[in-house]
Image (spheres, rainbow, N blue to C red):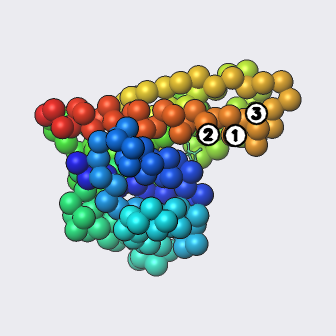
Amino acid sequence: MRLAVFASGRGTNLKRILEACKQGEIQAEPALVICNVPGAGAIQVGMDADVEVLGLDHREFPSRKAHEEAVLRGLEEHRIDLVALAGYMRLLSPFFVGRMHDPKLGQARILNIHPADPARYRGPDGYGWAIESGQTETAITVHFVDEGMDTGHVILQEKVPVLPGDTVDTLRRRGLETEHRVYPRAIQQVVSRIGGN
Ligand code: GRF
């Protein structure tokens, strides 16, 4: 089972996923990192772990489809079975999601981690939303990716308390600890399901 991770930012989830593969918590080979932001921390994280890193800056492509075609070529060349989005700040088009669809799984072979409950908040700033809207509890959600934004079928979800006095930064720190625990578990669940098909 060959895994690709897509990231646009710091790459702390990427780092944790690569460690989990090494330690056998995820029974997959991390074969590729794709990053669309030049200079993002995730690039160094992939290189430090000796994983192939493919930098594909979407701004250098004439269209979303042209960029996604380049991403798909990368997945084919590296014989990727499963994709985990880890802070990948690009919405994937129906074209891309369709190409990754696995009829046996009934889902595209793409997972995402969302730092909120998608039933309450969908979008790029889950921790900011929880603080600004005065939540006392939020959630970390791993879900399959479909054509919408943070709308796919939920695989695992864990609650995170929002404490009095929390700022976006303190909440994010607490939330990331949960993310780093939950994402490898969710990926392994899907790896087992695909492997058992
Ligand atoms: C995480 O909060 C993740 O839930 C969200 O983007 C952030 C990525 O953080 N989708 P990192 O780059 O893995 O540190």
Residue 70 in the image: above or below residue 89: below
Residue at disc 3, secondary structure: helix
Q: Position of residue 60 (x, y in %)?
A: 46, 78
Decide which of 65, 49 is in the foreground and name it.
49
Give the labeled residue for mark 2: 176
Q: Which mark is residue 106?
A: none
Q: Residue furthest front?
A: 23
Earlier in the chain: of badge 1 and badge 3, it is 3
Q: Which mark is residue 131?
A: 3
Image quadrant occupied by the C terminus: top left
Residue at disc 2, secondary structure: helix
Q: Position of residue 43 (x, y in %)?
A: 51, 67
User: Which tag is nearer the camera, tag 3 or tag 2?
Assistant: 2
- Residue at image coords 34%, 55%: 30
- Residue at image coords 33%, 65%: 71
Q: Position of residue 11 (x, y in %)?
A: 55, 55
Residue 22 in the image: above or below residue 166: below
Asked if the residue at label 2 sits under 8 Å from ligand 1, the reply is yes
In 3D space, how far apart are the residues under numbered discs 1 and 2 (Cα atoms)?
Answer: 5 Å
Give the labeled residue for mark 1: 173
